[in-house]
Image (cartoon, rainbow, N blue to C red):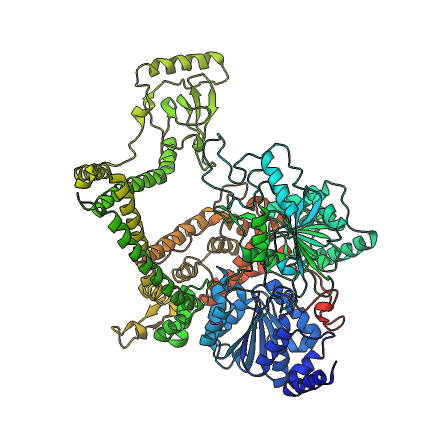
C-alpha cells in the first residue's frame, strides 16, 4: 500500500471512528458500497441499499445495530418471515450477546425490552398502532428484504411501518437489486426525510450461465457471461449466443413438428386456447407417453453431470411442490448416493436433533423415514408444504455441505440463506394459478442469485435444463437482463383504517395514505397515460379522415356493427356462465324413466334414466342410464356441458336389474319405441342462446345497419376497418380516462369507501355531542376498537361475529372450527371427504357467519369495494379434531394437506384465536380462545427443533466463513 493510500485510510478512520471500529471486527475489508452506505448511516441519514443476493448488504444493517449500542439507543431489526427473524437473532446474539438482543415473532417473545430486538414486520406494525412503550428511545429500524413490499399479502405492512414510524427514527432499508431503486429511494426521501441511495449492480461471485443438453453442460454465451463480469468499471455489453446451442436447436427442429413451441390441439386442428408461455422456452412440445428426447436429461443424469463438473451442492428449482417430492422419489429409485459415511453420521445427528421431540406415531404420519433416506443420500426437497422442522433440517445440512442436491420451489429464492455452488432451472415456464407463463428476468435473477457462495466458491453457475423447442437466444436474453421493478401492493384495510383514525384522526389518516408508495407510483403513471391519450386522439383523427365517405358517416356505421358484436358476445358469455349451473339443476331434477339427450362423451345420444344418482355424500349427481346401444353407463356432470332436457318418459320396472339381459332388452325395446314418437333432431331441444329482449335488440340494430347509407358503399369493408380501428382507440382512451380518474385519488378514495362501510356498521361514529358532525370528526367506537385488534383478511367479518355474539357458547374445538373458516383458503379440492362442519351446532353458527359475510359484502358492493373471500369450511373438521386431541395421522387424512400446510393453517387459527381473545370484552369467550391456543399448540404445531446455544462458537466471520452468517438476503 502506497503512502498516499495509507494517509487516505487514516483520514477516513478519523472521519468515521465508529465505522472504523466496526470494520475492524471483520477479517476481510468491507466493499466500497458497504462503506459508502455505512458512512451515510453514521452521518445521520436514512439509506436504501440495493445489491445482489450474497453481496453482504446486511453488514449495513448490522452497523446500524452497532451504532445504536454505542449511542445507548434502541435498534429494531425487521424481517418479513419468522425463519429469517430466527436466523438474524442467532447472528446478532453471537455478535452482541443474548443480554443485548431480543426476539419478537407471532408466537415467540424473548427479551423484548433488549436494546436490539429482531422481529417480523407485522409485530412492529402492531406496536406502532398500539403506541407501545417499547418505541421509546428507538433510534434505528433495519428493514431487511424490503423488496417484500411488492408481496400481495405482506407488502402493505412494510408501507404502514415506513409511514407510521416517528421522524426521529433512521430507516436502513436493504433490498435485492431492483431496477427502480431510484424511484423507491425518492419515495422514501419524500416520506422519511433525508434518504441516501446506494446501489451495487455487481455480484461478489461471478455467475456463469450454462445449458444442460443431455449429459453435456454447454456454455450459454460464446464469450464471458454478463453476470460473470465483476469489474464495476467494465463496459456493459451483450455477448453472442454459443453457436453450438444454436446448431442443437436447429437440428432438433428437423425432428419436432413445425409448431413445436406452440402445439396444436388434440385433433391437430388449430392451436390450444391456453399456450405454454410464449413458446420461446419450449417444453410444451414434449410428447406425452412418447420417446423422451435424448437432449432432455433425466434427473439422475442431471445430478451426475453436475457431480462430474464439480458443481455440487446445487439447488434445482421445480415450480411445484409435487414436482419437488417426485424428484426426490425418482432419485431414491436410482443408485445415486452423494454422501460418505462421515457425512451420513453428521446428517443423522442433525436429523435426530430436529425430530427428537416428535412421537414415533407422528414421524410415521409425516413420512419421516422416506425423508431421512433421501437426506442420508444427500438429496432433499424444500417447499412450503414441508413440516418446518424438516425444512430447517434440510437448511442446516445443506449449509454445512452435507446435502448435495435440494429440489426447491421458487419461495426458497426469497427466503432464508441457502447459497449453493450451482442453481438449476428445470423449466423457464411456470403455472401462475391461471396459465402457464414465462418467468420474468427479475425472477430469473432472483432464482440464479443463490449460485456462488462468497468466501467458498470462486464462481457460481446457473444451469438451464434443455426442453424440446427451447430457443437459446431467448434464454440468453433472459440471462442478460436484470429487470426487477418494485411495484407497491399497498391497499387500505378495515383494520388499518380504524387504527389510523384512532391514532391521528380521519383527515390526517387520509393524508398519510396519500403518501404511500402505491400513490407515488400512480401519480407518475398518470403522466404516461395522458401521453398515450394524446397519441390515440391524433391517430383517431387520421383514421376517421381516411374512412371518410361521400355516402355517409362510417363512424356511425362502425358503431352499429360494434354494438351488435358486443351484444352477441355478452349474451354468449352469460349463457356460458349459466350452463354449468343449469346442467346441475337439470341432473338434480331427473327421475327414473326420464328420456334425455346426452350431449357429449362416450355415451352421447338418447338415453333413459335408470337411477338419478343423487347422493347426500356426493357433491354432484351421477345418473345411471341406458343408451340406444343397450349400454348401461354411469354419467357425471362432465358429460353435460350444456343442460339436458327431458323429452319424454319410459317406464322402468321398480325392481329393474341391469345385470339381467332380459331386463335390458325389454327396456331397450321400450326406449326405441318411444324414440319413434318424438322429433329425433337434437336441435329441436336446444335452448336459444339469446333471451327474447337481446334477440329483439340485435334484430333492430341489424335492420338499422342494412338501411344505413354506408352499407351500399363499394369500399364498405375497407372504410369500416379504418373506422373500427378508430373506435378501438376511442374505447382505449375512455378506459385510460377512467384509470386516470381513479388513480389520481385512488388510495384516498378507497380509504373513504372503507370508512363508509365502517360508518354504516357503527365502527366509526360521530361525536356524542354532535351527531351531525363532519365525517372527518368521526371517531372509533367500542366496536371499532375490537376491530383494531383483528389482523386478518376477513377482519371486519370477524369483528362483527364477536359483536354479534356468534362465537359465544362454543366449546374450544367448535370455536377453532369456526375461526378456521375466517382464515383458511383452499388451494384446490383437498382432502378425501367433502368439506363440512364437524357438528350441527357449528353448522348453525356458520349460517350466521355467512349471513354476516353477505351483509358486509352488500355494503362493500354499494361502496364499490372488492368484497372479501367467502368463509371457507375446508379446514373446519381438521381444526376441530386437532383441538379435540385427535392424533396427527387421522387429522392429516381428513385434510389431504401436507404436514407443512397443516401446521401453517393451525398456526393461523391459533393467531386469530389469540387476537379474538385480546379483542373481546366477554371473559368467557376470552377464556375459550385461550383454551383453543393451549389445546392446538401441541405436537408438530408446538414442536421447535433442538438447537445449539446461539452464543456458542466463534464470532461471526462474515461471508468468508464456511457457514456465512452476514448475508441473509
In the rendering, at what x and y percent does residue 65 appear?
A: 62, 77
In the rendering, at what x and y percent does residue 133 appear?
A: 52, 79
In the rendered view of the protein, which quadrant contains the C terminus? bottom right
Q: Nearer the viewer, residue 229 or 460?
A: 229
For residue 282, side relative to residue 231 (left or right): left
At horizontal 32% and vertical 56% (from top left) the residue drawn is 536
In the displayed orientation, state which residue is furthest to the right.
341
Image quarter for residue 97? bottom right
For residue 510, side relative to residue 885 (left or right): left
In the rendered view of the protein, which quadrant contains the N terminus? bottom right
Image vertical order of residue 388 relative to residue 280, above or below: below
Tally of marks: 0
At horizontal 75% and vertical 58% (from top left) the residue drawn is 401
Image quarter for residue 646? top left
Image vertical order of residue 944 relative to residue 550, above or below: below
Image vertical order of residue 777 relative to residue 527, above or below: below
In the rendering, at what x and y percent does residue 699 appear?
A: 21, 36
Q: Nearer the viewer, residue 587 or 124?
A: 124
Q: Nearer the viewer, residue 467 or 301?
A: 467
Kindly tell me whether residue 377 is visible in this rendering. Answer: no
For residue 332, side relative to residue 769 (left or right): right
In the rendering, at what x and y percent does residue 745 appear?
A: 34, 66
Kindly tell me whether residue 330 is visible in this rendering. Answer: yes
Amino acid at each position: 500500500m502506497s503512502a498516499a493510500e495509507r494517509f487516505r485510510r487514516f483520514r477516513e478512520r478519523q472521519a468515521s471512528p465508529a465505522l472504523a471500529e466496526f470494520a475492524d471486527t471483520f477479517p476481510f475489508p468491507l466493499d466500497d458500497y458497504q462503506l459508502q452506505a455505512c458512512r451515510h448511516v453514521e452521518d445521520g441519514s436514512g439509506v436504501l441499499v440495493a445489491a445482489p443476493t450474497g453481496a453482504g448488504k446486511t453488514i449495513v444493517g448490522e452497523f446500524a445495530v452497532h451504532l445504536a449500542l454505542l449511542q445507548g439507543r434502541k435498534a429494531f431489526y425487521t424481517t418479513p418471515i419468522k425463519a429469517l427473524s430466527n436466523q438474524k437473532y442467532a447472528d446478532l446474539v453471537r455478535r452482541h450477546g443474548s443480554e443485548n438482543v431480543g426476539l419478537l415473532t407471532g408466537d415467540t417473545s424473548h427479551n423484548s425490552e433488549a436494546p436490539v430486538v429482531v422481529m417480523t414486520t407485522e409485530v412492529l406494525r402492531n406496536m406502532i398502532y398500539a403506541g407501545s412503550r417499547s418505541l421509546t428511545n428507538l433510534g434505528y429500524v433495519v428493514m431487511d428484504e424490503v423488496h417484500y413490499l411488492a408481496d400481495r399479502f405482506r407488502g402493505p405492512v412494510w408501507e404502514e411501518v415506513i409511514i407510521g414510524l416517528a421522524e426521529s427514527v433512521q430507516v436502513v432499508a436493504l433490498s435485492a437489486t431492483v431496477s427502480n431503486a431510484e424511484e423507491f429511494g425518492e419515495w422514501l426521501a419524500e416520506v422519511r426525510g433525508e434518504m441516501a441511495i446506494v446501489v451495487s449492480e455487481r455480484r461478489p461471485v461471478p455467475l456463469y450461465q450454462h445449458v444442460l443438453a443431455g449429459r453435456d453442460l454447454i456454455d450459454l454465451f460464446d464469450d464471458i457471461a454478463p453476470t460473470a463480469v465483476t469489474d464495476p468499471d467494465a463496459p456493459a455489453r451483450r455477448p453472442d449466443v454459443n453457436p453450438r446451442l444454436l446448431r442443437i436447436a436447429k437440428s432438433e427442429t428437423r425432428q419436432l413438428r413445425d409448431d413445436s413451441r406452440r402445439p396444436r390441439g388434440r385433433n391437430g386442428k388449430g392451436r390450444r386456447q391456453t399456450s405454454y408461455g410464449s413458446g420461446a422456452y419450449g417444453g410444451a412440445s414434449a410428447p406425452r407417453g412418447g420417446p423422451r428426447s435424448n437432449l432432455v436429461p433425466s434427473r439422475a443424469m442431471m445430478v451426475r453431470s453436475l457431480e462430474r463438473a464439480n458443481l455440487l451442492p446445487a439447488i434445482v428449482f421445480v415450480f411445484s411442490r409435487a414436482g419437488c417430492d417426485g424428484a426426490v422419489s425418482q432419485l431414491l429409485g436410482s443408485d445415486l448416493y452423494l454422501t460418505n459415511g462421515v457425512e451420513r453420521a453428521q446428517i443423522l445427528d442433525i436429523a435426530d436433533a430436529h425430530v427428537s421431540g416428535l412421537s414415533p406415531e407422528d414421524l410415521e404420519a409425516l413420512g419421516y423415514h422416506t425423508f431421512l433416506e433421501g437426506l442420508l443420500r444427500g438429496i432433499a426437497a424444500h417447499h412450503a408444504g414441508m413440516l418446518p422442522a424438516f425444512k430447517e433440517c434440510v437448511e442446516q445440512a445443506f449449509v454445512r455441505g452435507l446435502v448435495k442436491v435440494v429440489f426447491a420451489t421458487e419461495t426458497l429464492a426469497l427466503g432464508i440463506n441457502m447459497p449453493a455452488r450451482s442453481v438449476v432451472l428445470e423449466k423457464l415456464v411456470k403455472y401462475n394459478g391461471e396459465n402457464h407463463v414465462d418467468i420474468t428476468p427479475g425472477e430469473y435473477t432472483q432464482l440464479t442469485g443463490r449460485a456462488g457462495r462468497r468466501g467458498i466458491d470462486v464462481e457460481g453457475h446457473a444451469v438451464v435444463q434443455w426442453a424440446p423447442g427451447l430457443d437459446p437466444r431467448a434464454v440468453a436474453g433472459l440471462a442478460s437482463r436484470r429487470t426487477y421493478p418494485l411495484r407497491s401492493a399497498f391497499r387500505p384495510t378495515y383494520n388499518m383504517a380504524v387504527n389510523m383514525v384512532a391514532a391521528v384522526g380521519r383527515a390526517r389518516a387520509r393524508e398519510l395514505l396519500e403518501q404511500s408508495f402505491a400513490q407515488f407510483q400512480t401519480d407518475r403513471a398518470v403522466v404516461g397515460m395522458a401521453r398515450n391519450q394524446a397519441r390515440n386522439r391524433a391517430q383517431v383523427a387520421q383514421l376517421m379522415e381516411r374512412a371518410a365517405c361521400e355516402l355517409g358517416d362510417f363512424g356511425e356505421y362502425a358503431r352499429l356493427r360494434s354494438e351488435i358484436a358486443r351484444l352477441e358476445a355478452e349474451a354468449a358469455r352469460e349463457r356460458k356462465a349459466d350452463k354449468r349451473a343449469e346442467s346441475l339443476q337439470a341432473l338434480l331434477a331427473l327421475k327414473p324413466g326420464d328420456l334425455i339427450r346426452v350431449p357429449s362423451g362416450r355415451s352421447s345420444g338418447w338415453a333413459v334414466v335408470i337411477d338419478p344418482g343423487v347422493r347426500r355424500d356426493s357433491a354432484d349427481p351421477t345418473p345411471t342410464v341406458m343408451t340406444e346401444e343397450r349400454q348401461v353407463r354411469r354419467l357425471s356432470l362432465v358429460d353435460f356441458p350444456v343442460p339436458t332436457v327431458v323429452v319424454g318418459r319410459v317406464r322402468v320396472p321398480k325392481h329393474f336389474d341391469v345385470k339381467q339381459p332380459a331386463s335390458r332388452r325389454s327396456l331397450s325395446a321400450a326406449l326405441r319405441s318411444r324414440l319413434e314418437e318424438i322429433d329425433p333432431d337434437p336441435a329441436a331441444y336446444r335452448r336459444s342462446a339469446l333471451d327474447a329482449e337481446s334477440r329483439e335488440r340485435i334484430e333492430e340494430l341489424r335492420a338499422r345497419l342494412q338501411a344505413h347509407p354506408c352499407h351500399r358503399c363499394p369500399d364498405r369493408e375497407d372504410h369500416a376497418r379504418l373506422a373500427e380501428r378508430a373506435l378501438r382507440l376511442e374505447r382505449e382512451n375512455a378506459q385510460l380516462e377512467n384509470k386516470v380518474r381513479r388513480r389520481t385519488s385512488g388510495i384516498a378514495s378507497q380509504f373513504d369507501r372503507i370508512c363508509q362501510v365502517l360508518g354504516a356498521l357503527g365502527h366509526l361514529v360521530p361525536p356524542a355531542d354532535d351527531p351531525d358532525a363532519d365525517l372527518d370528526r368521526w371517531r372509533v367506537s367500542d366496536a371499532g376498537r375490537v376491530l383494531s385488534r383483528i389482523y386478518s383478511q376477513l377482519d371486519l367479518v370477524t369483528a362483527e361475529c364477536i359483536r354479534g355474539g356468534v362465537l359465544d357458547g362454543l366449546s374450544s374445538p367448535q370455536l377453532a372450527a369456526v375461526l378456521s373458516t375466517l382464515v383458511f383458503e383452499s388451494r384446490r379440492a383437498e382432502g378425501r371427504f367433502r368439506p363440512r362442519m364437524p357438528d350441527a351446532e357449528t353448522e348453525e353458527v356458520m349460517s350466521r357467519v355467512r349471513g354476516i359475510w353477505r351483509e358486509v359484502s352488500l355494503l362493500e358492493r354499494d361502496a364499490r369495494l372488492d368484497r372479501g373471500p367467502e368463509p371457507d369450511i375446508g379446514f373446519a373438521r381438521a381444526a376441530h379434531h386437532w383441538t379435540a386431541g385427535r392424533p396427527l395421522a387421522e387429522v392429516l387424512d381428513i385434510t389431504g394437506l401436507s404436514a407443512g400446510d397443516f401446521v401453517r393453517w393451525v398456526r393461523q387459527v391459533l393467531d386469530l384465536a389469540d387476537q379474538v381473545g385480546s379483542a373481546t370484552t366477554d371473559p368467557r369467550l376470552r377464556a375459550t380462545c385461550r383454551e383453543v391456543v393451549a389445546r392446538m399448540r401441541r405436537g408438530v404445531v408446538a414442536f421447535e427443533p433442538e438447537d445449539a446455544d446461539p452464543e456458542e462458537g466463534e464470532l461471526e466471520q462474515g461471508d468468508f466463513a464456511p457457514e456465512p452468517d452476514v448475508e441473509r438476503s
